[in-house]
Amino acid sequence: MRTFDYTQELPVVDGQPPAKAIDDVVSKPLDTKPGKVWKILITITSLMLLVGGGALVWTFYKGIGVWGNNQPVSWGFDIVNFVFWVGIGHAGTLISAILFLLRQRWRTGIARFAEAMTIFAVMCAGIFPAIHTGRAWLDGYLFPYPNANHIWVNFTSPLLWDVFAVSTYFTVSLVFWYIGLIPDFATLRDRTESKLKKTIYTIFSLGWRHSTRHWQHYEKTYMILAGFATPLVLSVHTIVSFDFAVSVIPGWHTTIFPPYFVAGAVFSGFAMVQNVLIFVRQAFNMKHIITIKHLERMNQIIILVGTMVGYAYAMEFFIAWYSGNQFETFTFINRAFGPYAWAYWIMVSCNVILPQLFWSKKIRTTIVPMFVIGIIVNIGMWFERFVIIVTSLSRDFLPSSWGMYTPTIYDLGILMFSFGLFFTNVLIFVKTMPSVSISEIKAVVDGAQPSHRGGGHHE
Amino acid sequence: MEYQKKELPDKVKNTGFLFAGIGLLLIAVSYILDPRREAFNNIIGLTFFASIAIGALALVALEYISGAVWSVPFRRVSEFIASSLPLVLVFAIPLFLMLGMLFHWTHPEVVSADKLLSGKSPYLNIPFFIGRTIGVILVLYVFYALFTRNSRKQDESKEQGLTRTNVKLSAAFMPVAGIGLTLLSIDWIMSLEPHWYSTIFGVYYISATLLAGLAATTYASVSLNEAGYLIPGVNKDHYYSLGALMFAITNFWAYIAFSQFLLIWYANIPEESIWFVMRWEGGWKYISILLIFVRFVIPYAGLLSQPSKSNPKRLKQISIFILIAHFFDLYWLIMPTFSKTVVFSFYELGFPLFVVGVVILAFYYQTKKHNLVAVGDPKLQRGLDFHL
Amino acid sequence: MTEHSRHTEEADIMNKKIYSIGGLFDTPDSITHAAEEAVKEGYTKFDVNTPYPVHGMESAMKLKPSLIGLVTLFIGLSGAAFAFMFMYWVSVVDYPLIIGGKPFFSWPAFVPVTFEVTVLSAAVGTVAVMIALFFKFPNNAHPLHDTNYMKHVSSDRFGLNVVAIDPLFDESKVRDFLSRTGAKDIEIFYEPERKPIRVFDPKFIGLLVVIAMVTAGVTYFTLNKLLYMPPFTWMAEQDRLSSQSQNAMFTDGFGMRNPVEGTVARGFTPYEFKGQPDSVVRNLSNPLPFSKEVIDRGKMRYNTYCSPCHGYFGKGDSRLNGQFPNPPTLHSDKVRNWPDGNIYHVITNGQNVMPSYDKQITRDDRWAIIHYIRVLQRSLNAKDTDLETKK
């Protein structure tokens, strides 16, 4: 039998479940007591949160001197983790906004989840710039407000652009996510039996009535938000890349950084979303909503953006040689064969070589290998940031000021804290909120829309 | 699905010959008057032509790989525009004879005196340079030939496996075209200033190429559909998609161009900023500022509102405008090397007119031989049923 | 049961006002058809409730296109303009700093923030306007809530209801219309009784007071106490030497060190007439112009450094209550006839009890002070011509 048929669209939902059944499936995790697996997992993630939180508290008490950063590598784990987590967030917006604008309807089943992951990832990312100032309780000064000292922030600094980009990104993602949740809260409000839940859902649904007069503005606004989120997501990682690229450090100052960082961000983000979705569909019996075809599509996108990242690596290397600039040339040779060569080769093999396995349809559609490759991609992308930041700083223009960087246990602890925060949030999210958009899924089930001939409403 | 193959009127052919004729005349006159200047214009013509042809081909591949359906009714239009691809080499041949006039890395005495250039000579040398250009065009042409052969076979057989083959081909096409366009842009544009370098330059040219191919496709598709040469069923939503894609790529171009400028302006390393300084002095300042408006602000404003994206008249205007803007962009990229002050007169007009004429003629002769709609494509019906 | 109680109590119904009549449909085709019929019937104030947006429903209901896009455009442009102008004001007008050798007005560097603020204001503004003005949300007291109708349109069926404010509304006609178009479970919705909101409810006021007190208290505690407790003070209390404290490391026990003998500060030129008699410096002339800015500067410096002994007007009336011998007046003929260079020399080297001021007052400021002293002297010895120049 042929496995492809181009005359039919890829179904968004397997089968034709009635609307009621969709309500039931999506709200099941909300209405049932948590299972054993969930309890074990939340224990693990809370432990990570707790132990890592210790490292965080110690940093607050003692100052950031407990980290491994020192001259010449004055940026270490803090910014590596920041860039890593912001990148993870990008896939969510890509799925929810860009694929929405491209009318890729298969995104429906996974969009809500991906948006939630965006928010959690940006929260994790936000920790690092907030604490790297040393006195996180004074971070209010990062924002321009008329303060008693009569000083203003420096608007020409890319680090300040970061403040604006990340806070805008977080706010807009949150608004986008909440807008999508309103109709679902209304549906939950009207089906729940528990009084407490009803109160909560009533508050959050704002009194939504599923009125067409509202849907009209709602859909338009959703599209506008998607239209804004698309350039926003590009701008965020672009601005993150400016943190490096506006400087004159060899290996940092290169013009391809903006699109290269965006591609890398989408790359790692998709791998993370794919990993978590595999877990969710197994755990909550949503295999007909998050189908293997969706995961295959995600894997195809992973290899597409992976190739873009590969292009950027090649271009950087080529131009480093072509430029004839001895510092540029040295930086890249140093990356590949210097003291941090191990990190470089982890990065190359995880980001460029191993994802090539996705060219095979069998691997693309089998759960275990794709899960493993997803993890590998994320390891590779973490190391990409490590390589960029640490190798360039540890050996720049003057050999007399070279030095090595070693993270301390507190660096690792805070990294663990961020992972704990992320996964704890994910676990709480799947138990408390509809992790698939009920109203969007209903709208794309076969037969949910009026037949084309019957309505007579098309131009 | 009731497609009737119709011949394009002679008017199209005559327009093509008119453009090509005037263009050729201007080129001949200019080559006699000022061969060096016209050689630079020849590069503009070459890169302009290459981006229309390769851009159209890339749209075909993008449709296959993304599984898009809305563009299926127009795919042949892109294919026909891309059919002019081998002619790009015709534009390169006179240049191969005049490389010494254009690229100062071609002079051995200059290279041996310059440490940087001698370091680059394994890449920047005449045989490899010529080989790269011919190689890139030929490899892309092979892709073109395979795509269209399968698609034409499908007109008769309606075999779905052919679409599958093309999807696989397009997956291979993507990296090849990306590298090919990067090489073309580095060779023909960046190496005019062989000391200057920018890693984003390939992406800059790729975005411009996609936009040029799309603008040409949009203009041809909308005109043909209005005149009734395409299959019935193409509606506002198809137009909207074309407009939205043009809007998106225009923004993408602006993003890439701004990123390149900001990073070079901010770091202000002399060997990099000189490239922008050259485009700021001697009157080039006005051209640079104009470019922001022509290439970004005007198309952006013209396509911003939702109705304008699906308005056929607006789409035709904007797509022509984008092609002009693309030419203008290439002019801005290439001519400052030729002259420290702004020069613009009939010398510059020969090549764009000639390119437009050649594309129209290539298109015309393709329509004589082949269907203007991919009638055997399994996604065609879905493409016609497309609604937002 | 309780949620339906208000519909089951017959007595109440007599007093209640009808809000609307609605019915439920099973398929998207039938609800689209019903909406078209309602338009044909002439109803304008009716609504269709569906669990998800049904394609083509807007045109079936003949709704005008949404104008929310204009709101976005307006807010977005305002945000962009505000951000750009604000950055201009901060970086050029209010707090100009040279950064990276760039001009104050570095517009390319303002682009990222302008973009972010545009997106932020447009996105948040659009949603806020939509929710608050277009939807008039939050509204949990709407008559449709907690009805069987709402339960279904929230989940699996499609509802159409004609609102009583429609000019063509008539209870029986609407019922007829609904059953004719195939609606099931036709239901009447009543306006809820609205309790007036009492702003001056003592409980409410009390709540406000409590919130205000808690907020003020927490803010006060945070800003005035908490931030001065460890670990927040670690920058202030660290293992370093405070100025003018003891240090055992040095044999003399002083924490502060003197510069090495013969050290010259960067950009410092020693005073070439140090210790020489007055006659040498008499001929120095004041290099500063006799302008208002210079005199203002001189006044400021004079009031700071000279006036404690010489008095604000140079009369020698010290404010120090005789702790030091009072200096002579500056209005004496001797001082008035001194050339500027002589006064300069005195300020620089001191004279009698007066110490040298060359560490405290910069050279330019000394010359500015001299101009000011001349102004003071002139004020007690004005000439007739001064009056004329006043015109």
Image (tube, rainbow, N blue to C red):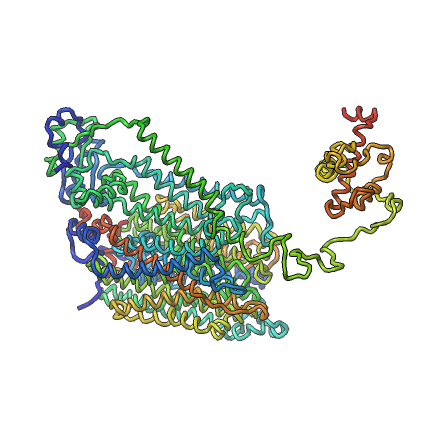
Nearest the eye: C376 or B118: C376
Give me the residue at 60% from left, 52% from top.
Answer: B283
Q: In this view, does B161 lie above or below C107?
A: below
Q: In this view, does C343 lie above or below A60?
A: above
Residue C311 in the image, given as x and y percentages of width and height:
75, 33
Nearest the eye: A83 or A110: A83
Tell me the quarter of the picture where residue B158 sits: bottom left
Nearest the eye: C253 or B341: C253
Quadrant containing the N terminus of chain B in the rendered view = bottom left
Relative to residue C307, is residue B293 drawn left or right? Answer: left
In this view, which residue lies farthest toward the right?
C279
Residue C81 in the image, given as x and y percentages of width and height:
48, 41
Can I make out residue A17 in this image? yes
Relative to residue A445, is residue A95 drawn left or right? Answer: right
Q: How many marks?
A: 0
Tell me the quarter of the picture where residue B193 sits: bottom right
Residue C146 in the image, given as x and y percentages of width and height:
18, 38
Nearest the eye: B116 or A390: A390
Can I make out residue A238 in this image? no
Relative to residue C386, is residue A355 drawn left or right? Answer: left
Tell me the quarter of the picture where residue C135 sits: top left
Q: Is residue C84 above or below residue A102?
A: above
Residue C379 in the image, given as x and y percentages of width and height:
79, 29
